[in-house]
Amino acid sequence: MQGVAERARLVGPLFCRADNELLEAVALLHDVGYSPSIVKTGFHPLDGAIYLRDAGAEPRLCALVAHHSCAYREAELRGFSTDLAEWLDEKTSLRDALWWADMTTSPNGIAVSFEERIREIEERYGSLNLVTTFIRQAESELREAVNRTEARLRAAGAFYE
């Protein structure tokens, strides 16, 4: 079984040591906002970023948590765009790698295809849920990040299945 952090380690050879360490840290922490003890807004990317900021985490880590997996789209649907704007979405290959790791890992930590992950989200939340609306709106951006990361991995000769 692999979790998001284990998937992120597969992408590590693409980055310098500091970025690789950051990617692994954010992969471990990207869903910290689900923890009931830190919920402030009910929107986990924002709650995670707020918690990490208040705990003194470096701003880039907070921003990557805040914007993981196209969170700005869900923030728009939830009315949190202004709150999320505190952190810049860096739109880098490292950000893409985080999105890839998250969008190719099932909730129970198993590596899955992007298509399987999208389908799992839609099935878990149901067709009328806001999360399903979000994932449908974000699908093309998420797919592009996944495709860019997989192209980088292939170019580097890295194994990622």
Image: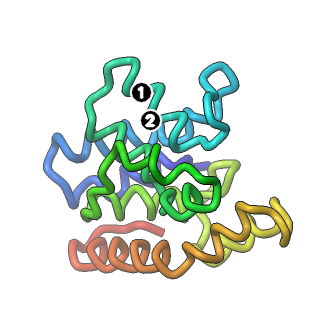
Image marks 1 and 2: residues in contact by CB distance under 8 Å: yes
Residue 143: mark: none
SS state under label 2: helix
Taking the spot 46% from the left edge, 53% from the top edge, the residue there is 68
SS state under label 1: helix
Q: Amino acid at mark 2?
A: Ala
Residue 81 placed where, x, y %?
Answer: 49, 54
Q: Quadrant of residue 118?
A: bottom right
Q: Closest to the observer: 138 or 118?
A: 138
Q: Is residue 117 visible?
A: no
Mark 2: few/some/many CA within 10 Å (<14, 14-19, 20+): many
In this rendering, the answer to whether 24 lies above or below 112 is above
In this rendering, the answer to whether 22 lies above or below 117 is above
Residue 108 placed where, x, y %?
Answer: 70, 48
Q: Closest to the observer: 18 or 61?
A: 61
Residue that badge 1 annotates: 52
Taking the spot 63% from the left edge, 61% from the top edge, the residue there is 77
Classify residue 74 as left or right of residue 61: right
Residue that badge 2 annotates: 49
Classify residue 156 as left or right of residue 129: left
Q: Amino acid at mark 1?
A: Leu
Mark 1: few/some/many CA within 10 Å (<14, 14-19, 20+): many
Taking the spot 56% from the left edge, 61% from the top edge, the residue there is 76
Q: Closest to the observer: 145 or 116?
A: 145
